[in-house]
Structure formats: structure tokens, C-alpha cells
Image: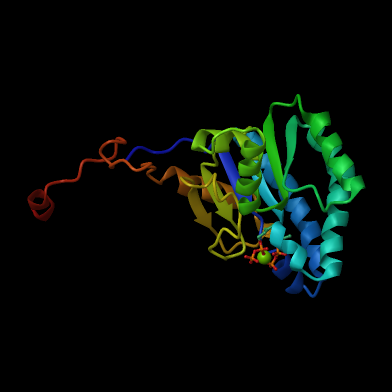
Amino acid sequence: MKAQGLPRHVAIVMDGNGRWATRRFLPRVAGHRQGVESLRRCVRACAERGIEALTVFAFSSENWNRPKDEVSGLMDLLLLVLQREVPRLAADGVQLHFVGDRTGLSARLVSGLAKAESDTASNTRLVLNICFNYGGRWDIAQAAERLVREGLPITEVNLNRAMALAHCPDPDLVIRTGGEQRLSNFLLWQSAYSELYFTDCLWPEFDEAALDHAIEAFRSRERRFGKTSEQVGGAQPLPLQSQVA
Ligand code: IPE
Ligand code: IPE
Ligand code: MG
């Protein structure tokens, strides 16, 4: 089997912050704060490894259903990230994109997101997409709506162009921390042929070694995109008799 190279685009469902905190008798929002530390480490590690794009799931369309204080804690944390982390990311050559529905976010947040994007637009070291108030179904629906508005036919190519992540190739590798094996409405369209990797590691504990494990697992997979193993350069299966001999 041909070994894969490095994934160009890695996407992560950063799950397990709440459990990380609860196990330490801390409030859940302390887990989210620790999650920001983990994200900072992961961004650096991805850039060092030559990954071109990193997309992370920070707040889902469904996370509004959490207790009010946790939701407002997460909004406050995003503001803090904009104030404290963005200048650092900008200096490190990271191009930031916030992906998701901005209606329903405060005016202060919306202008902060736009400023962070314009301040980092010319950076080229790593594209970082932060999915906030994002859902895969929202993305497909907003893309379809846009095509209708522009009077374009709903084709795969047009939908692809109208999707919120049109500036990136599809993710090669989708990682989910925290032990659950589901997508929870993340990148439904774009992950059609992504390699999925699930780990029990909680997001605040996901470090460079854990990232390298995920990349190694990816590199050992055979991506066939519907073809046969032989077509994509995999090992020819031995005839049954010579296997027995
Ligand atoms: C993921 O961690 C972050 C968000 C959903 C905002 P969780 O908060 O879901 O952590 P667990 O799954 O409860 O441990
Ligand atoms: C997915 O995690 C969303 C984010 C990581 C932002 P959840 O914790 O919300 O997912 P479910 O509810 O367990 O499916
Ligand atoms: Mg969770």
C-alpha cells in the first residue's frame, strides 16, 4: 500500500472540555479556557508540521441549548480570544476565518470577527478556520439559498463554491477528541471523503504527540475515493494458493 503524505487540511471536533473540568471539580467554562490553550498549542504544531489548513469546531448551532451561563461563558471566551490571541496569531502568519452564522451574535463580536479576518487576510503560513455558531446543515442551506438568490442552478460545483469553506480543499483528516464517534453536524458536505480519527483523549489534553498519532494513523490509511486498491497503487493481492503455501 502506498503511504499517504501529510494531510493538507486537518479538521478537529474539539470535544471533552466539560469532562476535563468536571473531573477536576472545576466549572465547565474552566475546561473551555483550557481548551483555548490546547488550540494555541495545536495551531503551532500544525504550522510546524507544514499542514496548510486547520479547521476547528468551537461552537455548534446546537450548543445554544446549553445552560445560559455556559453559553455566555463561551461568548465571553470568544471575545477574549479576539483580544488576546488574534494579535499573536497574526504575528505568527496565521490567516483567520470565522465560519458560521453571524446572526444571533452580538454586534461587538461580529465586528471583532471581521477585524480579525481583515487583519490576517494577507498571512500565508497556515489557514485557521474557527467554526463558531456553525452547523453542516446550516452551511448546505445557506449555500443553496445563495445560489437561488443569484439565479444559479443547484449543482455540486456551484454548491461547493457557495459553501463557507470554499477557500480550502476538503479536509483530508477529521479528528474528534473526547471519545464520541459522531460528527455532531460538523462539515457534513466537506467530509464526504475525509479520513475519520476518533480518540478518547479530552481536548485540553490533546498535545503534539496526540496530533502526531492522528497523522500517523492517517498516513497508514489507503484512500480509494471509490476506486479499487490496485487502481490507487495498493499491493496486488496474492492468489489464494500461494498464500496457503
Ligand atoms: C467541547 O467540549 C466544546 C464545546 C462544545 C463548546 P464540551 O463542552 O462538549 O465537553 P464535554 O463533551 O461536555 O466533555
Ligand atoms: C460538538 O461537541 C461541538 C463542538 C465541539 C463545538 P458537542 O459536545 O456539542 O457534541 P454532542 O452534543 O456530544 O454530539
Ligand atoms: Mg461535548
Can residue 151 be spotted in the picture? Answer: yes
Query: Would you say 147 lies left or right of 22 here?
Result: left
Which residue is situated farthest in the top direction here? 122
Residue 230 rendering spot, x and y as whole percentages: 25, 38
* Count of numbered tags: 0
Query: Which of the 4 image quadrants contains residue 73?
Result: bottom right
In the image, residue 94 above or below residue 31: above
Query: Would you say 53 lies left or right of 81 here?
Result: left
Query: Would you say 208 lies left or right of 23 here?
Result: left
Residue at image coords 69%, 26%: 124
Q: Nearer the viewer, residue 236 or 196?
A: 196
Query: Which of the 4 image quadrants contains residue 61?
Result: bottom right
Which residue is situated farthest in the front direction here? 151
Image quarter hosting the N terminus: top left
Colouring method of the image = rainbow
Residue at image coords 75%, 36%: 96
Residue 164 rendering spot, x and y as whole percentages: 66, 40
Residue 221 rendering spot, x and y as whole percentages: 40, 46
In the image, residue 214 above or below residue 63: above
Can residue 46 be spotted in the picture? Answer: no
Residue at image coords 55%, 46%: 212
Residue 232 rendering spot, x and y as whole percentages: 31, 36
Q: Nearer the viewer, residue 99 or 14?
A: 99
Q: Nearer the viewer, residue 22 or 154?
A: 154
Query: Which of the 4 image quadrants contains residue 226?
Result: top left
Q: Nearer the viewer, residue 143 or 165?
A: 143
- Looking at the image, in which quadrant does ligand 3 appear? bottom right
